[in-house]
Image: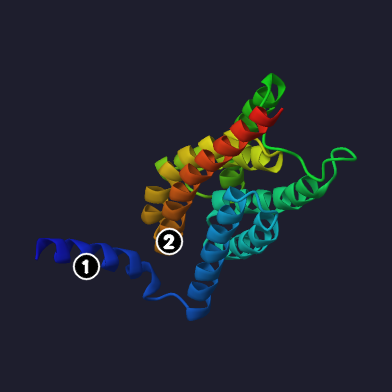
């Protein structure tokens, strides 16, 4: 009985923000969430379809988040959109005459430093984006800035096919799930919960593939 009441409370909490929302907007969010999940699944499989599915998903989110005035989230999805185009190119290009694509690898010192610079730049950029759009600065915006900066680095590492992208996705998703619940975007919170599971699975899969690559050298 208590479990039923608890589950019912969670369901009511998730659907409450959608009671007054337009059907079209709800369907768009659901489509973007499903495409986002598909994109992460393709990434786990090292499948280049990660990028076209990600481009469509992030394009929809940029539109939705602009309407909802969630500027930090809008900025990160716009960045994902651009980086997906770059990643699509980078995963497709030939690195030499014998290799048709880049391989999974770990970051070197230079890439770690660049990642740190991207993280700091992401924090500053999102903070001032909120200021420019006149958004009140609260604990939510600070948390949003942090996750955005983490995801900025994760997306860049993914475009370079660096295994560290998964550890950053895991960290960011852990924070994003409760953050989106507070924002009232239940479907997106569910999406990030699935992202978290896929990120853990993706890390384990890429680590296995990396060990196999190293063993074959």
Label 2 CA crowd tier, 10 Å (few <14, some 14–19, many 20+): many
Residue 108 in percent (x, y) is at 68, 23
- The quadrant where residue 157 appears: top right
Give the left or right position of residue 176, taking residue 85 as reference.
Answer: left
Tell how many labels.
2
Residue at figure coordinates x 69%, y 26% from the top left: 111
Circle 1 — which element? helix
| Residue at the extreme bottom | 23
- The quadrant where residue 209 appears: top right
Residue at figure coordinates x 56%, y 46% from the top left: 130
Residue 16 in percent (x, y) is at 33, 69
Q: Which residue is mark 1?
A: 8
- The quadrant where residue 116 appears: top right
Give the left or right position of residue 86, taking residue 68 as reference.
Answer: right
What is the quadrant of the N terminus in the image? bottom left
What is the quadrant of the C terminus in the image? top right
| Residue at the extreme front | 216
- Given residues 54 and 209, the one toward you in this image is 209
Residue 185 tag number: 2
Mark yes or no: residue 145 visible. no
Mark with earlier residue (2, 1): 1
State the separation of the CA atoms marked 2 and 1: 17 Å
- Given residues 194 and 14, the one toward you in this image is 194
């Amino acid at each position: 009985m208590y479990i039923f009441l608890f589950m019912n409370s969670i369901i009511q909490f998730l659907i409450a923000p959608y009671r007054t929302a337009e059907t079209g907007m709800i369907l768009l969010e659901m489509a973007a969430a499903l495409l986002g999940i598909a994109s992460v699944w393709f990434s786990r499989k090292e499948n280049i379809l990660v990028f076209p599915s990600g481009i469509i998903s992030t394009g929809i989110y940029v539109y939705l988040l602009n309407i909802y005035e969630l500027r930090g989230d809008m900025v990160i999805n716009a960045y994902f959109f651009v980086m997906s185009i770059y990643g699509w190119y980078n995963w497709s290009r030939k690195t030499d005459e014998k290799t048709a694509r880049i391989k999974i690898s770990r970051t070197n010192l230079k890439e770690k430093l660049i990642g740190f610079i991207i993280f700091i730049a992401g924090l500053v950029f999102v903070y001032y984006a909120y200021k420019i759009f006149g958004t009140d600065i609260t604990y939510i915006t600070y948390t949003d800035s942090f996750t955005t900066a983490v995801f900025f680095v994760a997306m860049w590492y993914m475009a370079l096919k660096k295994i560290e992208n998964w550890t950053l996705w895991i960290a960011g998703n852990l924070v994003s799930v409760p953050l989106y619940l507070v924002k009232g975007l239940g479907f997106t919170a569910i999406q990030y919960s699935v992202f978290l599971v896929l990120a853990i699975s993706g890390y384990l899969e890429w680590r296995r593939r990396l060990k196999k690559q190293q063993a074959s050298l």
